[in-house]
Image (cartoon, rainbow, N blue to C red):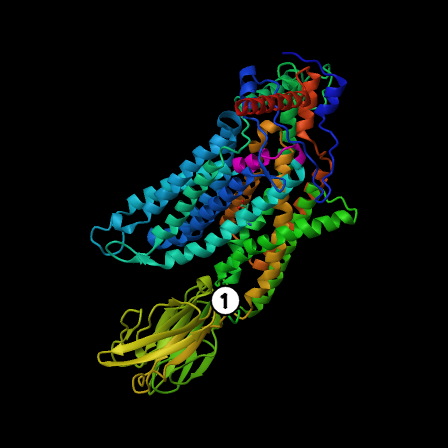
Amino acid sequence: MLIRHTPVLAALTQLSCPVQVFPHAGIQQLTHTHTPAASMPDEKMDETKKKKKKTAECCGYPISIFFIVVNEFCERFSYYGMRAVLVLYFRYFLLWDDDLATSIYHAFVALCYLTPILGAIIADSWLGKFKTIIYLSIVYAIGQVTMAVSTIHDITDSNRDGTPDNFTFHIALSMLGLILIALGTGGIKPCVAAFGGDQFQEHQSRQLNTFFSVFYLCINAGSLLSTLITPVLRAQECGIHTQQQCYPLAFGVPAVLMVISLVVFIAGSGMYVKTDPEGNIMWSVCKCIGFAIRNRFRHRSSSYPKREHWMDWADEKYDKLLIAQIKMVLKVLFLYIPLPMFWTLFDQKGSRWTLQATTMSGDFGGFILQPDQMQTVNPILILTMVPIMDRLIFPLIQKCGLNFSPLKRMTVGMLFAATAFVSAALVQIEIDKTLPNFPSSSESQLKVVNMYSTTLNVTISPSEHLLIESYGSSADYITFDHQDITVSLNTSNVITKAFSLIKGGRQTLIIPSDPTVMYLVEDTKSKPREGKNAIRFVNGWTADLNITNLDSIEPSATTNYTLVNQGKRDFVLRHGEQWCEFSRKFGFGASYTFLITEAVFSSDCESIVEVEDMKPNSVHMALQIPQYFLITTGEVMFSVTGLQFSYSQAPKNMKSVLQAGWLCTNAVGNIIVLIVAEIGKLPKQWAEYVLFASLLVAVSIIFSIMAYFYTYIDPAEIEAQIRKEQGLEPEEKEKEKETLEMEEKDQKNEQGVKQTKI
Ligand SMILES: CC(C)C[C@H](N)C(=O)N1CCC[C@H]1C(=O)O
């Protein structure tokens, strides 16, 4: 079909349709019409008409929305609940090391944000949103059930020792489960948001904007509840033959929630507005773009007149409407290029910020907050801030006469995220002041512990002289810029021994009751993980000792470090019939060596000496609240607005595709985090935070320039006008006809009823 350019069409294809600004939130008012596309065959048109109906309303909202938001709540509960225990499952059930566990975890998260493209293509080109959500939810639920089954250790625990015997089986099953989950969660994500938007009629544009906020609230309510509940479920013990940490329950409850999510969605099926896909739209889009590029190349000579847009080179072969729709999508996708940077910063909440929290104190008086629990501050703040922003802040800005348009909001959101990282840098500087002076890669550090019965004169060549009392230690670590040292002890006769220290390491020289066998032990050279405390014991007693939860310890030996949580901890020391109980209260992130003296049992454990290898954390976790507040404010402005914007600026037949494009910005952000983590860090963590903040400021400046040149459009209006230009039946007429038909039908029905009554 060859359609010539008319002036009106030319203006339209520039996509400069003015749009009415939505009064309270600065979002353009949109018309939501469910017009069949120009290219749609007649049978299909009739099919769509049949499905089009007036939706039941409650307080101005379509009732079908209720099913969609409940579905989203359950789905997010399922997703975030499963995610909350996933790394622990890898680490402690599959027994993977930290690196493998975190890499697979991040790869899974990135995959979940890449699969939306697939879901969107299926929905917009083939099945339609409704069927895509149903089918992919089934895949998702099967994935969750597979995952839950893979965590039942009894399946392969034939020797009943509490650990699975066939790890390959559990790994294979859980990987299959994760792939299905990624397909499901990612696949339905762009469809659910867009399908929700489709439920609104022309006169409900205010409600449509509120819908996206409520949708976001549901995401965060679901994620908050599940991240609080699933770790508790995991901590339970369960099993058929042996009792183990209850992973099947922790993964089983999210699986049940996914089934509920599907049931709720199906329950609403009679009420939904369902728009059919218009043939293989993605294939048509690709062919059209391909043709435009080829045609442009063929006519590259300057003798050919220029066209306004490179997509206009598809004019010879493709429908004006399709070209205009592609232009709309490409314009928005181009605008999205800088956006992954926001998510790069946002996603570091779960990694860098949680690591930062492990070097802080979580004692809030009435309750103790673990470092990873700090992340729940984000959904909690979302639940309070979305309503405040929607009902108070945005209307106030509007009242002040400022045009806080969606793209301006997103820019400000990015700037908020950047200031959150400046705040994180300031907190880091405070933390750094309290951190021990760890050795550089060329240095070695040494501490000396004297378990000998009298005070010792210790000389470490060439120039360190220490006087260390019995069951005491040197005041702090001594730093050496060389590794080979000689230690001389001034006992009844001089004992000399040479040692080679570990480069970049921290060690303790233990001088036991027989100083001739003095030896080195390796110390922890970073803050213990997860805010725990690293403790160990040196046995100065004359025989073997048993200590609760530790192996038996020989005389003069030192145990490995054991990690203990914050709070009061009790240890029972035992040798045969003799025993005593030793209690200590721990803070966050400290390290201790406990020296067990010869008088341990006679003093009822009172004589045990505590050597502090690393001070407990002293900077309070509450200092992270400002950075969480700033990033969440940024998220509300950026992410909620982005969802609305992606829906409002998409042509009707590509709503899911643009939602997928939006979600892809998140996937790319995640991948950047992965790459940054692999490449390594700047020597100073605060400097890395400042670097990220600066990058985001730079990106938001670029984005604001791009946004300045962006013209908001009303896709429905553009589509309608192009159809009119092409001489197709105008939307309004079609709607009028349909209303008339419905009214006639109603009248006939009423007459029928009256006649039967008579
Ligand atoms: C990380 C929180 C639990 C959830 C977050 N506030 C959020 O709502 N999202 C992060 C990525 C987009 C959005 C989501 O859809 O989960």
Q: Answer whether residue 581 is magenta in the image.
A: no
Give left or right: position of 712 versus 385.
right
Q: Is mark 1 within 8 Å of ligand 1?
A: no
Q: Residue 488 in the image: x percent, y percent?
A: 38, 79
Taking the spot 69% from the left edge, 27% from the top edge, the residue there is: 717
In this picture, is 695 found above or below 377? Answer: above
Q: How many marks?
A: 1
Residue assigned mark 1? 438
Magenta region: 190-203
Name the image quarter holding residue 233.
bottom left
Q: Nearer the viewer, residue 185 or 215?
A: 215
Of residues 366 and 22, the one nearer the viewer is 22
The amino acid type, in three-letter code, at marker 1 is Phe
On the rendered structure, is 152 left or right of 623?
A: left
Q: Is residue 96 visible?
A: no
Residue 749 location, quadrant: top right
Is residue 380 in sight in this rendering? yes
